[in-house]
Image (spheres, rainbow, N blue to C red):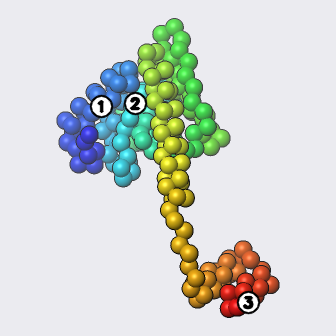
Amino acid sequence: MIDYKTATKAELLAEFERLKKISHDDGFFTKKEFLHFPQIAMPNETPIGISSGSMDGKTWLIILTNQRVIFLDKGMFFGLKQVALDLSHISSVGGETKLLFGEITIAADGHTYTVENVSKKGVVPFTNMIKQAIEALKQSKEQSANNHAQQPATNNNDPFEQLERLASLKEKGIITEEEFQAQKAKILG
């Protein structure tokens, strides 16, 4: 695996070729978009797959990472359009193959993004990659939550710390003044 932030252009192009191969995509006119990825990558973000096609009459690259789905359109000479969807916000992923090409549809946060003229043989593998990445993220979060829940709770009998926590709850409006006074009386015995 390469470090995208420090990779050379040759390393990035080799990675682009690798991702095109596993995604069954031709990467048609999207090399410049992929070369832009290191500038927008988040810490510990790595591409899993790519797809390319047209959206709103422009050629876009879709980069699936372990954290997001990123749509990139870098203008021929200048300009950049970017849409990034966190995997946890994606509500549905679909694909359709037609006679020569296919299309990929991704819905998130009330918006639907449809990329047409996608490589026909890449539609199913890429949509499956997105679904697998979403599932892996869910399992990772569940595992993290389970590990956190399994950590032993500290039994803190220090009355000062208990009073501080109570005061904080009262300040936040979680408990009323009456509840605060009742709990305070219990703690102070």
State left or right for residue 12 relative to residue 132: left
Q: Is residue 57 visible?
A: no
Instruction: Name the residue tied to disc 2.
Output: 50
State the separation of the CA atoms marked 3 and 2.
Answer: 62 Å
Q: Secondary structure at mark 2?
A: strand
Q: Is residue 155 visible?
A: yes
Q: Under tag 1, what secondary structure? A: helix
Q: Nearer the viewer, residue 6 or 167?
A: 167
Disc number placed over residue 61 in the picture, else none? none
Question: What kind of residue is marked 1?
Answer: Phe
Disc 3 designates what residue?
A: 185
CA distance for labels 3 and 1: 66 Å
Cα separation, mark 2 vs mark 1, equals: 8 Å
Percent coordinates x, y for residue 62 in the rendering: 44, 33
Position of the C terminus, as image quadrant, is: bottom right
Q: Earlier in the sequence, mark 3 or mark 1?
A: 1
Whether tag 3 and tag 1 are in contact, CB under 8 A, the answer is: no
Q: Residue at x 57, y 30 (%)?
A: 93
Contact between labelled residues 1 and 2, with CB atoms less than 8 Å apart: yes
Using the image as rendered, state which of residue 110 and residue 144 is in the foreground: 144
